[in-house]
Amino acid sequence: MAKVCPLCNALQTLAQECPRCGQPMVDGGMLENYFGPYGPYRTEDGKSGPDDSCCGHLYYCPNCGYDERLAVSMVNI
Ligand SMILES: [Zn+2]
Ligand SMILES: [Zn+2]
């Protein structure tokens, strides 16, 4: 049994509406792609990347540029 992120593995898609303009937001991918010494995104507390119980995803609105981090719970497969 392995724990995987349902979004990374295309088991599930998350419909997320932009709280600003109501347009559908799109999954920008795993936060691991953004975190790191040269990445544009960092957490406030200095921790980076997802842990093993959830996977961090960045959702952004292509319409107004709003973005939001979501912690996606891992599921067993
Ligand atoms: Zn993921
Ligand atoms: Zn928007």
Image: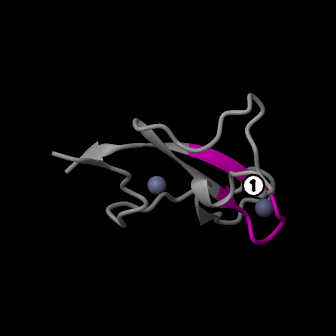
Residue 48 appears in view: yes
Describe residue 15's horizontal placement relative to residue 8 as left or right: right
Say above or below: 17 vs 74: below
Residue pushed farthest left? 1
Rendering coords of residue 69 (x, y %): 65, 47
Q: Is residue 27 within the magenta segment?
A: no
User: 31 or 64: nearer the eye?
Assistant: 31
Q: For the N terminus, which image quadrant?
A: top left
Residue 58's image quarter?
A: bottom right
Rendering coords of residue 3 (x, y %): 28, 45
What residue is disc 1 on? 67
Residue 48's image quarter?
A: top right
At a point 76% along the width and 57% down the height, the residue shown is: 39
At a point 38% along the width and 52% down the height, the residue shown is: 5
At a point 71% along the width and 56% down the height, the residue shown is: 18
Q: Amino acid at mark 1?
A: Asp
Figure label count: 1
Residue 62's image quarter?
A: bottom right
Rendering coords of residue 34 (x, y %): 68, 57
User: 45 or 10: nearer the eye?
Assistant: 45
Rendering coords of residue 72 (x, y %): 47, 45
Residue pushed farthest top? 45
Q: Secondary structure at mark 1?
A: strand
Describe residue 42's horizontal placement relative to residue 52 as left or right: right
Q: Quadrant of ligand 2?
A: bottom right
User: 3 or 66: nearer the eye?
Assistant: 3
Which residues are the magenta region? Answer: 59-70
